């Protein structure tokens, strides 16, 4: 039961992060550039953008 709660929380946070990137033009543009790199998905994009403080 606790694991299910945590999994739900992770999904909600991932949705918030993706929504933030989608709704911010600068972040969205940079995410699209990162997406052009093979094997770079949404999670990697978010990590790279956060690490380099976009």
Image (tube, rainbow, N blue to C red):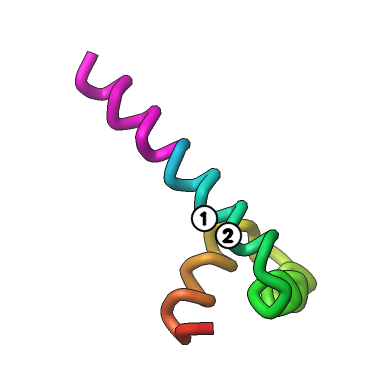
- 47 versus 13 height, above or below: below
Which residue lies under the disc numbered 1? 17
Residue at figure coordinates x 61%, y 52% from the top left: 19
Residue at figure coordinates x 39%, y 28% from the top left: 8
User: Which range is magenta?
Assistant: 1-11
Q: Quadrant of the N terminus?
A: top left
Residue at figure coordinates x 59%, y 54% from the top left: 18
Quadrant housing residue 29: bottom right
- Secondary structure under tag 1 reads helix
- Secondary structure mostly taken by the magenta-highlighted segment of the chain: helix
- Secondary structure under tag 2 reads helix
Residue contact between numbered discs 2 and 1, judged by CB atoms under 8 Å:
yes
Q: Quadrant of the C terminus?
A: bottom right
Quadrant housing residue 36: bottom right
- 3 versus 25 height, above or below: above
Residue 20 numbered tag:
2
Q: Is residue 25 left or right of residue 20?
A: right
Image x and y of residue 47, in percent: 47, 68
Observer-nearest residue: 17 or 51? Answer: 17
């Amino acid at each position: 039961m606790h694991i299910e709660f945590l999994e739900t929380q992770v999904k909600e946070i991932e949705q918030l992060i993706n929504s933030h990137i989608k709704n911010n033009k600068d972040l969205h543009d940079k995410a699209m550039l990162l997406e052009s790199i093979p094997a770079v998905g949404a999670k990697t994009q978010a990590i790279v953008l956060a690490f380099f403080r976009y």
